Amino acid sequence: MYYVVKYSGPFAFIKPWTAVRDTGGGETYSQQFLTPSIIEGMRQKLEVTKIIRHKLTYVTINLQQETVKAKAWNFSKGRYTMDASILKRGVLINPCLYLAFEKEIDADKAHKQHICLCRNEDILLPSKDIMEVSEQEFNELDGYELRFGKGEKSFLVGYDRFSNNSEMFGWLDIVGTPVKNSYNE
């Protein structure tokens, strides 16, 4: 059995590992899957033994404009200033994330906490109940899931900040309709 906690919120952003290089045009779209290091970061934040599976759905991606400032200060005409830039960030609207645990105690601990996918202001809250489902039932849930590992269908998904920036691989498992027509679906 899997013990599953469903998290949802109004919006979320999963920063692509290529975001720094892809922003030449000023637009960065949210990833539709969670990398192994994102899952590890959540595991550490939730203080659980292991997150064994995950599924992600959302309603749409919306471009939101954001002002960002450089870390460096400039000194000009007797004043210190920071350069500002405007970028467009494609965020997931009404994301729903299912996290599956082997142990009920881990699900219970996770169920009492909020999570953030990749930005602290994008908070997802747990649903009312913990679900108990079989592996087969979890497999049938709609959603995007990055299955971790290197194989025939795998592609490079980033570099693991928890393991000396080693390459991370996985393949995308898409089930049903991960992009929903409405929040209630």
Image (cartoon, rainbow, N blue to C red):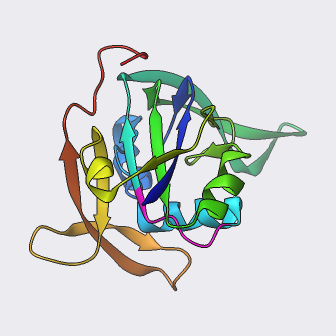
Res 154 → quadrant: bottom left
Question: Is 174 above or below relative to 63?
Answer: below
Q: Which residues are magenta?
A: 48-53
**Quadrant (top left/top right/bottom left/bottom right) for the C terminus:** top left
- Residue at 35 percent across and 78 percent down: it is 167
- How far across and down, in percent of the image, does residue 176 sit? 19, 36
Q: Quadrant of residue 130?
A: top right
Q: Nearer the viewer, residue 73 or 98?
A: 98
| Magenta residues, dominant SS class | loop
Where residue 44 sits: x, y (%)? 66, 67
- Left or right? Give the position of 10 relative to 14: right
Residue 127 belongs to the span the image colors magenta? no
Question: Is residue 15 visible from the viewing direction of this image?
Answer: no
Q: Quadrant of the N terminus?
A: bottom left
- Expressed as whole percent of the image width and height from the top left, the position of residue 135 reads 32, 58
Instruction: Find the residue positioned furthest to the right.
Output: 78
Residue at the extreme left of the image, as rendered:
152
State the image coordinates of residue 68 (x, y, percent, origin top left): 63, 36
Does 167 sit above or below residue 137? below
**Residue 166 to residue 87: above or below:** below
- Could you say which is closer to the camera, residue 169 or residue 3? 3
How many numbered circles does the render carry?
0
- Which residue: 73% across, 46% down? 112
Residue 51 within the magenta-colored segment of the rendering:
yes
Seen from the viewer's position, the closer of residues 158 and 83 is: 158
Residue 95 visible within the image? yes
At 61% across and 55% down in the image, what residue appears?
A: 107
